[in-house]
Amino acid sequence: MKPTADIYDDYGDRLQSCTTQFRDLGARMAFEGVVATVRCHDDNVLLRAALSEPGDGRVMVVDGGGSLRTALIGDNIAELAAGNGWAGIVLHGAVRDVEALARVPIGVKALGSNPRKSGKEGVGETGVDVSFGEVTFRPGSRVFCDADGILVLEGN
């Protein structure tokens, strides 16, 4: 993957640039793919179910409402996603198992961490537009992530 700075130079204002500052927590610092989405707040049932399906190199973008109250993913869910072929996860929320996540071969960007488990009610939505950091992530768009940040290109 080209660095996001070079991708921006190539595409310019056709790209959206996420202003939210994320921590890089997975073993892959750079990743890209077609966007899939989940919106869930302090409940990871739908997220786990989505990551249990074949990822085909996609990137799961999760609107967790920016909550740091509970972790939406940990090492077990990240390993599940990596094993199912997901390229990465962008999580507008918290993770747990930070040291273990650093060894999982997947890209993980999140706001922070909290050891508290999430709820298990199955509340949320999948396959919907999600917005944070002045960007709207639409299923089917392409996302590019590295240490410099996150870019989104509409369509493929």
Image (spheres, rainbow, N blue to C red):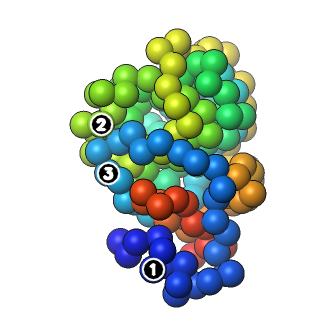
Q: Which residue is mark 2?
A: 102
Which kind of residue does numbered mark 3 sit on?
Arg
User: Secondary structure beneath disc 1?
Assistant: helix
Q: Which residue is mark 1?
A: 6
Residue kind at label 2, given as amino acid type? Ala
Q: Residue at x 49, y 78 (%)?
A: 7
| On screen, residue 5 above or below 84 | below
CB atoms at circles 1 and 3 under 8 Å apart? no
Q: Amino acid at mark 1?
A: Asp
Which comes sooner in the sequence, label 1 or label 3? 1
Task: Give the Cα distance between marks 1 and 3.
Answer: 19 Å
Q: Given contact means CB atoms under 8 Å apart, are the residues at marks 3 and 2 in contact?
A: no
User: Which of these two is toward me, 69 or 61?
Assistant: 69
Instruction: Answer with the quarter of the image where residue 25 lies.
Output: top left
Q: Number of callouts in the render?
A: 3
Q: CA distance from mark 1 to mark 2?
A: 26 Å
Identify the mark nearer the N-term, 1 or 2.
1
- Residue located beneath label 3 in the image: 28
* Residue under the image location 52 percent in, 12 percent down: 116
User: Which residue is pictured at 48% across the width and 74% down the height?
Assistant: 5
Question: Horizontally, is 69 left or right of 72 in the view?
Answer: right
Q: Are marks 1 and 2 in contact (CB under 8 Å)?
A: no
Q: Position of residue 44 (x, y in %)?
A: 58, 26
- Residue mark closest to the camera, 1 vs 3: 1
Q: CA distance from mark 3 to mark 2?
A: 8 Å
